[in-house]
């Protein structure tokens, strides 16, 4: 009996030892995907499932246009099997990080290569005020392209398919799974697009006045809305007082019921316009990044876009 117990103890000790020694190897076997922006992260994680570890590089709540990667971010990218960013026009900081990366080890995907880009209409955006020059290095306006490509759902379809192809390249055994999951995401994007088209077809106003930076140009173009923002395409640029006065005038002349505020920053600008005009403040989430509580809640790109549609329909007084 004693002998049996001894054997059992030895066996248990061996068993206990085994997983411990195997654990690090098993973890290392799961390739890591590092993504820069929330939509890329959300699409990649929904396709990768358990097969890969998907990481969002931006810490929660951090403004993405001027992000300065920390040494640990650079280390993470170097450990990754795949690095997904939008493109040089959105994350110039990614280019700087990648300069020191071994491209033989990390597959780098510019997900927005091949999407339909929109030129920036700086005219009337009022963002070229004092203090702008110091931000010039980070201002994507210098590329002449609006970086917010994910706010056109056709572009998302292209990015989903490109990410799926890159996942398959890193993990060929999962290729079929990635293809299926990409198809499911594309279907959800089609549904979302249809809901936007139908939901915004018949509204009392088509004027979207935004007390934030110029992020929704793609969305406005796609659904035939006139979009006016307080600041330029790059966040953290304070609008000129003249621009605020113009928006107040615009709310009055178009009898707009709402003024929209942006995510992750104070809604102060929208509130100022609201106080002057009586228009209601409603949120429009640009989805560049999410707040900590949103990340904890497991919010998805689709949740954010559904909430935006709801607020647009309220603010523009849409039928049905
Ligand atoms: Zn932006």
Image (cartoon, grey):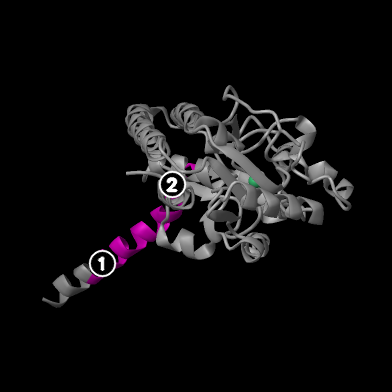
Front residue of 116 and 110 = 116
Q: Which residue is mark 1?
A: 12
Residue at disc 1, secondary structure: helix
The segment highlighted magenta reads 9-32
Q: Quadrant of the N terminus?
A: bottom left
Asked where in the image residue 275 lies, by quadrant, the reply is bottom right
Q: Which residue is mark 2?
A: 309
Residue at disc 2, secondary structure: helix
Q: Along the polypeptide, which appears first: circle 2 or circle 1? A: 1
- Mark 2 vs mark 1: give the one in front: 2
Front residue of 242 and 309 = 242
Q: Residue furthest bottom?
A: 2
Q: Position of residue 226 (x, y in %)?
A: 59, 37
- Residue in view at x 88 percent, y 49 percent: 134
Give the alpha-carbon distance from disc 2 to disc 1, as whole Å: 57 Å
Most common secondary structure along the magenta stretch = helix
Q: Position of residue 82 (x, y in %)?
A: 55, 37
Is residue 30 visible to the viewer in this orientation of the structure? no
The answer to whether mark 1 is within 8 Å of ligand 1 is no
- Residue in view at x 60 percent, y 58 percent: 59
Front residue of 149 and 225 = 225
Q: Is residue 14 rendered magenta in the image?
A: yes
Front residue of 251 and 13 = 251
161, above or below 51, in the image = above
């Amino acid at each position: 009996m004693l002998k049996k117990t001894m054997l059992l103890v030895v066996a248990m000790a061996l068993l206990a030892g085994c997983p411990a020694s195997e654990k690090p190897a098993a973890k290392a076997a799961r390739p890591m995907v590092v993504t820069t922006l929330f939509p890329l992260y959300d699409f990649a994680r929904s396709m990768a499932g358990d097969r890969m570890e998907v990481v969002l590089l931006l810490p929660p709540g951090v403004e993405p246009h001027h992000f300065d990667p920390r040494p640990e971010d650079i280390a993470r990218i170097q450990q990754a099997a795949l690095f997904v960013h939008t493109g040089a026009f959105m994350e110039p900081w990614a280019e700087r990080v990648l300069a020191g990366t071994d491209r033989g080890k990390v597959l780098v995907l510019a997900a927005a290569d091949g999407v339909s880009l929109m030129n920036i209409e700086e005219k009337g955006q009022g963002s070229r005020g004092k203090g702008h020059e110091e931000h010039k290095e980070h201002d994507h306006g210098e590329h002449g392209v609006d970086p917010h490509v994910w706010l056109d759902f056709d572009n998302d379809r292209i990015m989903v398919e490109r990410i799926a192809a890159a996942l398959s390249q890193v993990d060929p055994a999962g290729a079929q799974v990635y293809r299926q999951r990409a198809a499911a995401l594309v279907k959800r994007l089609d549904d979302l697009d249809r809901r936007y088209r139908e939901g915004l077809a018949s509204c009392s106003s088509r004027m979207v006045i935004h007390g934030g930076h110029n992020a929704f140009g793609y969305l406005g173009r796609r659904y035939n809305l006139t979009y006016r923002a307080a600041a330029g395409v790059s966040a953290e640029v304070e609008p000129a007082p003249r621009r605020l006065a113009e928006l107040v005038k615009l709310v009055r002349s178009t009898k707009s019921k709402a003024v929209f505020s942006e995510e992750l920053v104070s809604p102060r600008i929208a509130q100022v316009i609201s106080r002057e005009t009586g228009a209601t403040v409603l949120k429009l989430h640009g989805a560049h990044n999410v707040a900590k509580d949103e990340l904890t809640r497991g919010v998805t790109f689709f949740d954010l876009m559904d909430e935006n549609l709801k607020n647009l329909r309220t603010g523009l007084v849409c039928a049905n």
